[in-house]
């Protein structure tokens, strides 16, 4: 077995570009991950609101139409994580919209592989900078992003409807 990242071999995980047929699996995975990962960060009502807002079939289909690309981390024919990357207003930037690995699969390098796929894709499209937003209270995610070369470059509080606010750090990384 060939090692491709910390504790990961090619036979353990495959990173596959998602198609429209895979969006239900991604939405189902989000519904498993979010209540676990965000329970101490945002309220259950906000989790439910954001899941509906970001992972409805219509929203996911629109993402694909607007050029957002999704990848799935697959182990034994089952999805264990996913990532989504899309264009920004500036042609030399792309936005990492989503990067999640189910907590049962944390620590195996799958997130690193998804991030490597995102970076390779961005570079192949002439992108020089990856940007993302992350909840300011999500210390675990911020630590992972910093480990992979992202730096905090700003802050953004956005009203998202339903009386909820996303309170995020903006992070960026040069990739090309």
Image (cartoon, rainbow, N blue to C red):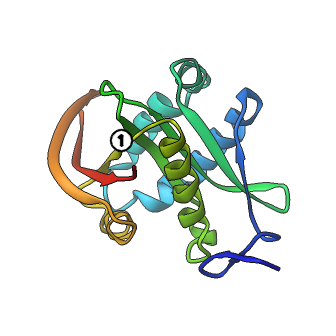
Q: On the picture, is 72 further left or further right than 119?
A: right
Dot 1: element: helix
Residue for point 45% across, 61% down? 37
Classify residue 107 by image quadrant.
Answer: bottom right
Q: Is residue 171 above or below residue 58?
A: below
Q: 93 or 101, which lies in front? A: 93
Q: Where 105 sits versus 96, above or below?
A: below
Q: Residues within 10 Å of mark 1 (few under 14, many from 20)?
A: many
- On the image, the x and y values in percent for residue 11 come to 82, 70
Question: On the image, numbered disc 1 is attached to which residue?
Answer: 46
Percent x, y for residue 67? 53, 24
Between 115 and 119, which is closer to the camera in this rendering?
A: 119
Q: Is residue 127 left or right of residue 117?
A: left
Residue sitting at x 32%, y 54%: 173
For the question of whether residue 163 can be seen, the reply is no
Task: Tell me: residue 149, above or below residue 57.
Answer: below
**Image coords of residue 149 (percent x, y):** 34, 65
- Quadrant (top left, top right, bottom left, bottom right) of the N terminus: bottom right
Quick check: can you spot residue 95? yes
Residue plotted at (57% across, 17% down): 65
94, 155: nearer the viewer:
94
Q: How many marks?
A: 1
Q: Is residue 141 left or right of residue 165?
A: right
Q: Nearer the viewer, residue 117 or 54?
A: 117
């Amino acid at each position: 077995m060939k090692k491709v990242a910390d504790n990961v071999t090619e036979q353990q995980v495959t990173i596959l570009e998602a198609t429209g047929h895979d969006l239900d699996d991604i939405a189902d995975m989000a519904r498993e991950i979010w209540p676990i990962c965000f329970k101490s960060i945002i309220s259950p009502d906000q989790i439910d609101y954001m899941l509906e807002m970001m992972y409805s079939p219509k929203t996911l289909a629109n993402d694909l139409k607007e050029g957002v690309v999704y990848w799935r981390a697959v182990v034994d024919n089952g999805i264990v994580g996913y990532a989504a990357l899309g264009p920004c207003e500036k042609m030399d930037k792309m936005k990492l919209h989503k990067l999640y690995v189910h907590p049962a699969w944390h620590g195996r390098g799958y997130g690193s592989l998804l991030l490597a796929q995102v970076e390779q894709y961005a570079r192949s499209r002439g992108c020089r900078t990856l940007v993302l937003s992350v909840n300011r209270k999500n210390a675990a995610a911020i630590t992972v992003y910093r480990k992979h070369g992202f730096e905090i470059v700003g802050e953004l509080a956005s009203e998202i409807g339903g009386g909820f606010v996303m309170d995020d750090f903006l992070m960026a990384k040069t990739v090309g």
